Image (spheres, rainbow, N blue to C red):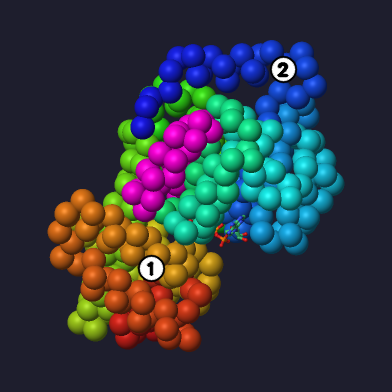
Amino acid sequence: MKAPSMAWNLVHAQRRLFSSTARQLGTYGFIGLGQMGYQMAKNLQSKLPPTDSVRLYDINKVAMQQLSDEMRESQAGGATVCLAESASDAAKEADTVITVLPEPQHVKAVYAELISPGLPKRSRLYIDCSTIDPSSSREVAGSIASAGQGQFVDAPMSGGVVGAKAGTLTFMLGSPDALVPTIEPILLRMGKRVLHCGVQGTGLSAKLANNYLLAIENIATAEAMNLGMRWGLEPKTLANIINVSTGRCWPSEVNNPVKGVVETAPANRDYAGGFGISLMKKDLKLAIVAAAEARANLELGERAREVYEEAEKLEACKGRDFSVVYRYIGGKE
Ligand code: NAD
């Protein structure tokens, strides 16, 4: 994809400057108001000045209406809110469009609508925060560029629903260098950190590589804890040793799968909340697809995927935090 020119950035900057004397300063379209998008849109809108506008769209009309009511009733003020009739209606007047959608097919479908001939050509900035595979993301970026609709970047996030609500998400940004100064302040209204990973698509590569590692570490931690306990170790003693030794990782230290080890971990509330097992399974599947495309050998990927898939089928594990694999492998509870 062609890097945006200085002129492109200038147009955006000028549009903002010029319109500061006009009625509206920044115009945003926000598409996908689910668990993450709902909270992100709320933070974005509340941190924008009233001269800006946010046009909301989701196929779930109830979520759209509820969010706009909440925004309008909020004492926090913020940008003007409008409801869109469709994804293209959300995007047509926008300088910046943010999408937070579940899977590759949803992202492709929404952007296929956005490049349909009806949408006026404009140098929009499209920021996709969905977790999808990098090659689907590159395909969408290419179609936006060839349709003359602007620039598309990937900015998947970590921090979960709690981070989305608190505005503390971390974004992994795949974007041309020249666009970073424009994108960063937008994302920082919804999060606390933006990590620029490289060209378009690399935000997703970073996210999937990290989550691949996490998927394996989580299973290995469950197995190691179960193993040690069956050998007679106290779970807290074992975790304390691992956490000052070479086995230390996020699942052992923060999200330990054994009840009573880490007070704030989902294991202490019957694995409620946290990072859902279905999302872990989804990210792992995306990582496996992307690894095959890059001809990267994964020795453990398929087996890990089977573990999450099988675990999710059990009533006792379904819908729970992914550390529930400890229960799936028959860990002592
Ligand atoms: P979600 O399923 O709760 O929300 C997705 C929203 O998209 C829904 O409201 C749905 O109605 C809407 N949608 C689907 N198709 C649409 C279309 N064609 N047009 C408009 N709206 C449409 O998902 P989520 O939990 O908000 O996650 C969104 C993305 O963020 C996913 O890719 C997920 O992997 C990623 N993510 C989620 C979490 C998390 O903890 N939930 C954490 C990090 C990243």
Left of 274 or right of it: where is 175? left
Q: Residue visible at 62% across and 30% down?
A: 95
Q: Number of numbered discs present?
A: 2
**Displayed quadrant of residue 168:** top right
Does any portion of residue 60 appear in the rendered image?
Answer: yes
Q: Which residue is mark 2?
A: 19
How crowded is the residue under tag 2: few (<14 C-alpha within 10 Å), some, or many (20+)? some
Residue 258: x %, y % from top left: 38, 74
User: Start and end of the magenta stretch?
Assistant: 133-160
Q: Nearer the viewer, residue 158 or 265?
A: 158
Question: Height in image: 293 above or below 126?
Answer: below
Q: Nearer the viewer, mark 1 or mark 2?
A: 2
Left of 95 or right of it: where is 22? right
Tell me, yes or no, whether the two marked residues, 1 and 2, touch with CB atoms within 8 Å: no
Name the residue type under label 2: Ser
User: Label 1 vs label 2: CA separation?
Assistant: 45 Å
Left of 224 or right of it: where is 108? right
In the displayed image of the protein, which residue is found farthest to the right? 73
Q: Residue visible at 50% across and 19% down?
A: 8
Nearer-N-terminus badge (1/2): 2
Is the distance from the Cβ of mark 1 to the nearest ligand 1 atom less than 8 Å? Answer: no
Mark 2 falls on what kind of element? Answer: helix
Residue 7: x %, y % from top left: 49, 14
**Displayed quadrant of residue 145:** top left
Identify the mark at residue 102; answer none if there is no mark: none
Residue 135: x %, y % from top left: 34, 49
